[in-house]
Image (cartoon, helix red, strand yellow):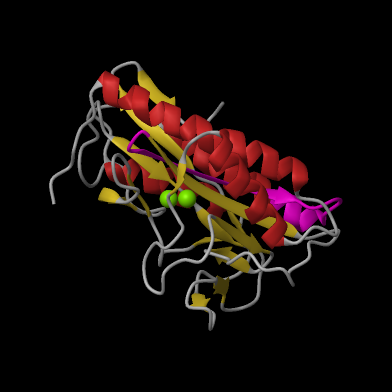
Amino acid sequence: MAIHLKSAGEIAKLREANLVVADVLDRLEEAAKPGVSTWELNEIAAQRLRQLRADSAFLNYGHPPYPAVLCTSVNEAVVHGVPRKDVILKEGDILSIDFGAFKDGWCGDSARTVPIGQVSKEARALIDATRESLERAIAACVPGNRLGDIGYAVQSHVERLGYSVVKQFVGHGIGRAMHEEPHVPNYGDAGKGRRLSAGLVVAIEPMVNAGGPEVVIEDDGWTAVTKDGSLSAHFEHSVAITDGGPVVLSRA
Ligand code: MG
Ligand code: MG
């Protein structure tokens, strides 16, 4: 499948969609407190989407059709955690919130892992390492670099700290569709793979496990959890590669 490089005008539309996503994630981060259910967070996101006249990128996506506008992955859940009334956040949890929206036909996609109240030093360190790995990957998003430089930036950072990267799920191009070419793995070799060109827009999303990299899918058909039960963190930004360097579209 061909890669669609975006014009400055198209990148501006993607920026608008990603600002919707950032707005919603800010509200969810504020609301994510002990005693709140992940379903309540989904309702906050759905209401804000309506206010901003934007549409969910997640609702009814895939097979089985995804049943919510938000992914809420708690502790050992890696990604695609389905919001539930009976999943009540508690002090010490870590929550990965992933949100995607369409605005005027263009898609935004971003995720962050947040601590619920006070968390362990181990949980804090995993969150920090995952966020740092995304920042390193973003810094690699310059024309002339290669796709492998992005994955290498993530993998080398977190493995040095004793963590593992999930390989079963990867980042992606993003545009009029949520998932476009190319695949953007969180692992790879520096200097290898497709050359990065100005106009390429990618959603980079490291998923980092405190233990091993293996993931299993729960009976709901969506929620991915670490096989060994270890904690997992997830950060994602939609990033435009431009001649002026990386532009993080999903940062307010
Ligand atoms: Mg996402
Ligand atoms: Mg994504």
Q: Is residue 63 visible?
A: yes
Q: Judge whether 42 appears above or below 142 on screen.
A: below
From the top left corner, tell me how far across and down residue 63 is, in percent. 37, 72
Q: Dividing the picture into quarters, in which one does residue 174 lie?
A: top left
Q: Is residue 233 left or right of residue 40?
A: left
Q: Residue at x 68, y 56 (%)?
A: 95
Camera-side residue of 82 and 77: 82
Q: Residue furthest top?
A: 244
Q: Is residue 141 visible?
A: no
Q: Is residue 149 left or right of residue 75?
A: left
Q: Residue at x 41, y 69 (%)?
A: 65
Q: Judge whether 74 appears above or below 29 on screen.
A: below
Q: Magenta part of the protein: which range?
A: 104-126
- The answer to whether residue 112 is magenta is yes
Q: How many marks?
A: 0
From the top left corner, tell me how far across and down residue 163 is, in percent. 58, 60
From the top left corner, tell me how far across and down residue 238 is, in percent. 42, 37
Q: Residue at x 41, y 53 (%)?
A: 186
Q: Is residue 66 left or right of residue 143?
A: right
Q: Residue at x 65, y 53 (%)?
A: 43
From the top left corner, tell me how far across and down residue 34 is, in percent. 85, 56
Q: Residue furthest bottom?
A: 219
Q: Judge whether 59 appears above or below 2 on screen.
A: below
Camera-side residue of 28 and 230: 28
Q: Is residue 159 left or right of residue 123?
A: left
Screen quadrant of the C terminus: top right
